[in-house]
Amino acid sequence: MNLQERIHVLRDLGNKMRKSDDVELENVMLKAEIENPWFTQNNIRQALDAISTQFLNKTALDGLVEKYHLDDNIQPKNVGIVMAGNIPLVGFHDLMCTFLVGHKSIVKLSGSDSALMNFVIHFISNSLQESANYITVVDRLKNFDAAIATGSNSTAKHFEYYLKDVPHIIRRNRNSVAVIRGNESDEELTVLGQDIFSYFGLGCRNVSKVMVPENYDLTKLFRAFDPYKEYINHNKYKNNVDYNTALFLLNKENFLHNEFMILKQSESLLSRIGCLHYDYYTNDTSLVQWLEAHKDEIQCIISQEDLNGLKTEKFGQAQCPAIDSFADGIDTIQFLLAV
């Protein structure tokens, strides 16, 4: 397949994802929720909309081709991809980049996200006669020239050993942080809630901690986040909120809570499901210093205002990354071109 044929396949996939009345897709979505109850129909649709809108359109794909001067003069290599399954289709961007560049993907799926990824892989593989050669699903990676592996900090150690002899990208735990200035309206804070509650907070781009100015009235957050209270109706989310509330009470830890979320002051970026960490900053200098010191733990910074040259994204944009927004700040296309 040449580059233009691969672009055409990806655009067709985007069109498929955008259909709201596609019976095949609807059945896959239902199967995915049975496979993983965290993947509600709304969450799956949100992921499909984000991927089809941000990635799988002519402007985005042509822009990526132009930016990296992609062409047909590449020697295809076998790239192993170990996918995560924390949110729907979280491994798609790695697969898309590998396919677009012209390499062949050897994919180890997550058991938490096999229905949706198999649907995507089946669509690509059956689009054109040659496309079936580009993606292989395996239980164990072998015979690969390079690898991209996503997992936790603990699994990263195993990946480092297993992949030590080939070029690789290994992704670890990261979380996102939001900066609140204190002058935001309730409406703006409600939009920030999308970055916190989407996918039940399970994505690395979800905000798990907010930095607030000293003496900030935290009840503003409870009021602004009220539109998300229906999340507590999800059984697994409610169980986590109840468990974490009980745990903090038993440990005699200080926290604030309402019926659907917990606010807890903590230095840590990583928070439990249903719990949002917060901490105070005194001025912009100390804030930027803290963000810089934790940059290896931060996936993205969400802020309505610029922060002394740091890369930020606006409220509500955490789960709508552009096609050239790469996880952990590692340029996947450059890596693939250098294999």
Image: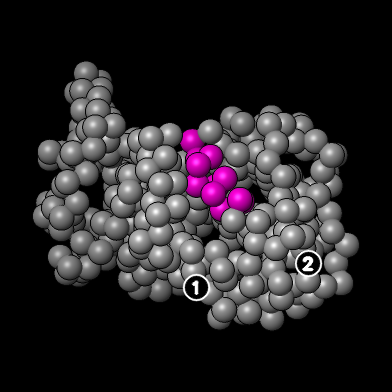
Q: Quadrant of residue 331?
A: bottom right
Check disc 1 and report the residue beneath it: 309
Question: From this viewpoint, is residue 31 visible?
Answer: yes
Residue 102 is left or right of residue 16, and the answer is right
Residue 4 is left or right of residue 174, and the answer is right
Of mark 2 and mark 1, the one earlier in the sequence is: 2
Q: Position of residue 236 (x, y in %)?
A: 29, 32
Image quadrant containing the N terminus: bottom right
Q: Nearer the viewer, mark 2 or mark 1?
A: 2
Image quadrant containing the C terminus: bottom right
Q: Quadrant of residue 156?
A: top right
Figure disc tally: 2
Q: Position of residue 7 (x, y in %)?
A: 66, 72
Instruction: Measure how far apart labels 2 and 1 are at the Cα level.
Output: 41 Å
Residue 76 is left or right of residue 307, and the answer is right
Few, some or many C-alpha atoms within 10 Å of disc 1 (few <14, some 14-19, many ≥20)?
A: few
Q: Which SS class for mark 2?
A: loop
